[in-house]
Image: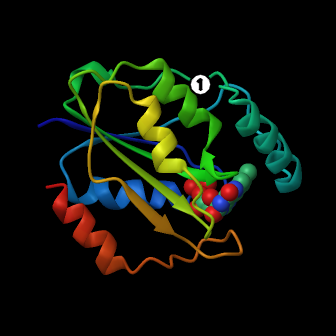
């Protein structure tokens, strides 16, 4: 089975950190989703923009990935939680691609308010087989302290072997 890990990360690199943990243990390719227009560097402004975008379902333009998802059987997709749903760039990625006949493993990082991220990702992956969805908790200050025990994450990664 060929596996591609695709993630978006903006704030602390939390989602990137989990994506890299999976990549270290599972034969896979790994790449990041990047928006064409970067978000403001100042947290408050980026957060306000993110709020407007998630509320309206806006899909920002994203850069072409270095891999073609049609070459893979399984796509593992990671997003931070933004205003109770996936980050807008991940919405673009899921909406723009055809996952027919593929397995999609959605995972998300959050700070304690997980909202409907997994449900929203599942709804966008039309015709994919969704499996092993996973929420991973970082600290409630929005920082980079991992709260979900690493042993739980390891067990989840083992289940993906
Ligand atoms: C714009 C924005 C909105 C956020 N909204 C939420 C939220 O609704 N619920 C939550 O638990 N965490 C929320 N967070 C916290 C992040 O989901 C969390 O810190 C995540 O691990 C950051 O991942 P990253 O470092 O890969 O970007 C938000 C962070 C940002 C920047």
Does residue 136 lie above or below 61 as drawn? below
Residue 90 visible in rendering: yes
Q: Nearer the viewer, residue 67 or 87?
A: 87
Position of 149 compared to 86: left or right? left
Q: Residues within 10 Å of mark 1 (few under 14, many from 20)?
A: some
Residue 51, x across and y down, in percent: 78, 44
Q: Give the labeled residue for mark 1.
A: 62
Q: In the image, what residue occupies the spot 60% across and 56% down? A: 115
State yes or no: Cβ of the residue under disc 1 lies below 8 Å from any atom of ligand 1. no
Q: Is residue 102 above or below residue 134?
A: above
User: In the image, what residue occupies the spot 18% across and 64% down?
Assistant: 158
Q: How is the image coloured?
A: rainbow
Q: Secondary structure at mark 1?
A: loop
Tell me, yes or no, if residue 12 can be seen here. Answer: no
| Residue 20 location, quadrant | bottom left
Q: Quadrant of residue 123?
A: top left
Q: Is residue 62 left or right of residue 94?
A: right
At 53% from the left and 49% from the top, the residue drawn is 117
Q: Compared with residue 49, is residue 20 higher up or lower down, i.e. above or below?
A: below
Residue that appears at 86% across and 52% down? 42
Quadrant holding the C terminus: bottom left
Image location of residue 106, percent across then percent down: 38, 46
Q: Quadrant of ligand 1?
A: bottom right
Q: Where residue 71 sits: x, y (%)?
A: 22, 22
């Amino acid at each position: 089975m060929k596996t591609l890990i695709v993630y978006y990360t903006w704030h602390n690199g939390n989602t990137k950190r989990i994506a890299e943990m999976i990549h270290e243990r599972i034969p896979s390719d790994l790449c990041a989703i990047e928006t064409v227009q970067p978000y403001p560097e100042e947290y408050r402004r980026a957060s306000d923009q993110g709020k407007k975008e998630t509320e309206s379902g806006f899909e920002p333009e994203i850069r072409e990935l270095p891999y073609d998802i049609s070459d893979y059987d399984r796509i593992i997709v990671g997003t931070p939680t933004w205003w109770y749903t996936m980050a807008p760039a991940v919405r673009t990625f899921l909406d723009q691609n055809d996952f027919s006949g593929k397995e999609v493993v959605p995972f998300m990082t959050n700070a304690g308010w997980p909202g409907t991220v997994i449900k929203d990702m599942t709804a966008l992956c039309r015709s994919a087989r969704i499996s092993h969805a996973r929420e991973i908790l970082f600290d409630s200050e929005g920082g980079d302290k991992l709260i979900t025990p690493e042993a739980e994450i390891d067990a989840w990664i083992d289940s993906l072997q």
